[in-house]
Amino acid sequence: MRKLLLPFSWIFRFIVFFRNKLYDNGYFKRVVLSAKVISVGNISVGGTGKTPFVELIARYLVKKGKFVIVVTKGYKRESDDMQVVEFGYKNEDHKLTAQNFGDESIMLMENFGDIPKRSGLLIAADNKRSGSKLADSKFKPDVIILDDGFQKRNIHRDLDIVILNTQYKGHLIPAGNFREPYSSTHRADIRVLNRKFDDSMDLNLSKLGKIPEYKYENENFINLENKCLQEKKINAIAFCGIGDPGSFKKLLDVANIIIKQFLVFPDHYSYKQEDIEKIINSFNSSGAEYILTTQKDFVRFKYSIDLYTDGKNIIKEFLYNYPVYYSKLQLKFTENQDILFDKLDKLIRD
């Protein structure tokens, strides 16, 4: 069916090519900020693991004593106002939700909860250029990290990082899942390979040269009360609404979890009451012991509990009355991490 959209993909490819040429030749101007700017992006539509990589870089720079601001879009949030939150913010009153801050932004906020305050800020802005200019002029950071910034060429960056996975061939949108052709990755300062949970990826690395590689490890499954799942043999149902649901399925396979049912929803999905009831019914009918999901999905529920002020609070019932656990991932480098960290060290020295 998507083959019918190929003419539109060719038109889009021409627009992308022409736009990049205008930037390359200086016809389109970039805003230059006082802070050092690092962009972390990709060439496909979601699913390459940019956000965990942004977290890793931010933590590294904070440990180096740098004041860091992460600028992200807060994709599919319902409000378009700019939101600013400090690293270390606990969000105990649940004022920030996926609806007003974005699920990936909420996940970053939660993961930054252990970082000392006054170390950095997280800004959700529909327009990354405006968000970056505000961050630079008002808060005077040492470093600004653009989450999903590879296509935001109207901002000068001092270090351009592009995340790759095996899916590097195919058509541009709308017939395919690519925002730019693979050849565009050559303008990046660093290309990084995310192997996720699969060490046997079929990728011709000779074309890439020596590049950093990393994969994910499941640190633990955690529930609303921050308790970890202790059992070794687990049977469960699982659900997710992420860009690459296959990677979550692979995580569960690697963890030797018996999956009774695996429910897939669209990326950044806003779960409705009937969706939650579907998950509950699946759990009740499957004979499973647990319900497993991703952290990105879990935070959508966790910080939406207080949105129901009257009637049946299906989210509260779901999280408090059912054994719902999310996967907490750990990013682990497997090859050439010194290339990345040497670049980061040089950036903050200059």
Image (spheres, grey):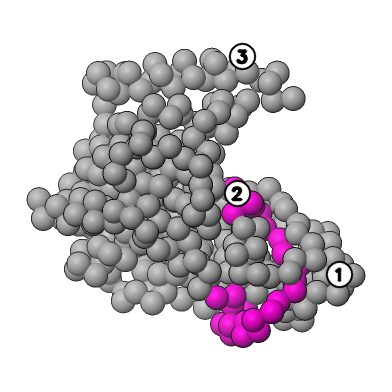
Q: What is the quadrant of residue 150 in the picture?
A: top left
Q: Residue at x 57, y 33 (%)?
A: 177
Q: Are marks 3 and 2 in contact (CB under 8 Å)?
A: no
Q: Give me the C-alpha separation between circle 2 and circle 1.
A: 24 Å
| SS at badge 3 | helix
Q: Earlier in the sequence, mark 3 or mark 1?
A: 3
Q: Residues within 10 Å of mark 3 (few under 14, many from 20)?
A: few
Q: Amino acid at mark 2?
A: Asp
Q: Are marks 2 and 1 in contact (CB under 8 Å)?
A: no
Please determine whether, in this image, residue 323 is positioned above or below residue 64. Answer: below
Q: Amino acid at mark 3?
A: Pro
- Nearest-to-viewer mark from 3 and 2: 2
Is residue 254 in sight in this rendering? yes
Residue 246: x %, y % from top left: 64, 51
Specify whether residue 116 is painted magenta. no
Which residue lies under the disc numbered 1?
A: 286
Is residue 317 in sight in this rendering? no
Residue farthest along the left direction in this orientation: 350
Res 7 label: 3
Q: Residues within 10 Å of mark 1 (few under 14, many from 20)?
A: some
Residue range corresponding to the magenta coloring: 220-248
Residue 24: x %, y % from top left: 27, 22
Q: What is the quadrant of residue 88 in the picture?
A: bottom left
Give 322 or 201, whichever is nearer the viewer.
201
Res 244 label: 2
Q: Amino acid at mark 1?
A: Ser
| SS at badge 2 | loop
In the image, 57: left or right of 75? left
Q: Residue at x 51, y 42 (%)?
A: 202
